[in-house]
Image (cartoon, rainbow, N blue to C red):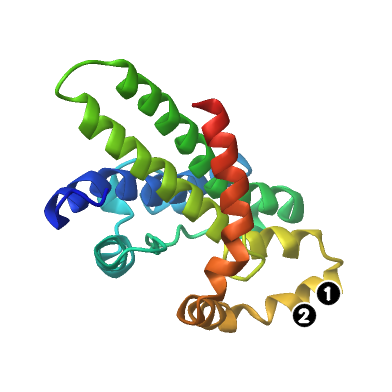
Amino acid sequence: MGDINLIQKITIYALPVLFAITLHEAAHAYAARRFGDSTAYMMGRMTLNPLKHIDPIGTVLLPLLSVTLGGFIFGWAKPVPVNFGALRKPREHGRLVAAAGPAANLLMTLLWVLLFKLAIGMDTSYSEPLALMSQAGIGINISLMLLNLLPILPLDGGRIVESFLPPGMAWKYSKLEPYGMWVLLALIATGLLTTILRPFYGLMYGLVRALI
């Protein structure tokens, strides 16, 4: 996308970023209610309305800066409130609720792949914009899926790891949650995050290329 200007780039990325982040959170809410916790539903968060999930900094400012400066797309929506104790099987269902967000990003990756295949098969004025937007959607959803699967609390990967640990170890592991975002920011600032995730990016993009 080196031959497009900044405004065009922001336009191309806007919808994929919005869908990737908000649908990720909505998936947590749907899964939580499915397994017994109606907290998000009662607070009006079990919805595909992006206005209910947008965080001004995480959903707008940071992704905008990421697109402008290039590199890793980083952002978040307002976290969906989940009362894990209200789930019918807190540990088993808790890991499914946590996995629902990355699973939504994987599904959206596949949908953007289908749209990309549709775009390159068309011969209209909409082909190139749709292809560029689809490429953005693929990249954003892979990035957010892999980011959220890192075994760091409060990320989804951390919740999944916690659910598999014996109760005593899980309790000790949960005590690390207040430091999780600082660890993540340090990984981003030092460039280690890209180094850690690069092999997984390669694997995912290899699968995407095979599908295309």
Above or below 17: residue 75: below
Image x and y of residue 113, in percent: 44, 30
The residue indicated by pointer 2 is: 172
33 and 9: which is toward the camera: 9
| Mark number, residue 169 | 1
Image x and y of residue 128, in percent: 23, 30
Side of 175 where 188 appears, left or right: left
Residue type at numbered disc 1: Met
What residue is at 76 percent from the left and 76 percent from the top?
171
190 and 56: which is toward the camera: 190
Residue 30 visible: no
What residue is at 74 percent from the left and 62 percent from the top?
161
What residue is at 51 percent from the left and 77 percent from the top?
181
Tag 2's secondary structure?
helix
Tag 1's secondary structure?
helix
Side of 55 where 23 appears, left or right: right
Residue 114, quarter of picture: top left
Q: Residues within 10 Å of mark 2 (few under 14, many from 20)?
A: few
| Mark number, residue 81 | none
Gap between marks 2 and 1 measured at Cα: 5 Å
207 and 78: which is toward the camera: 207
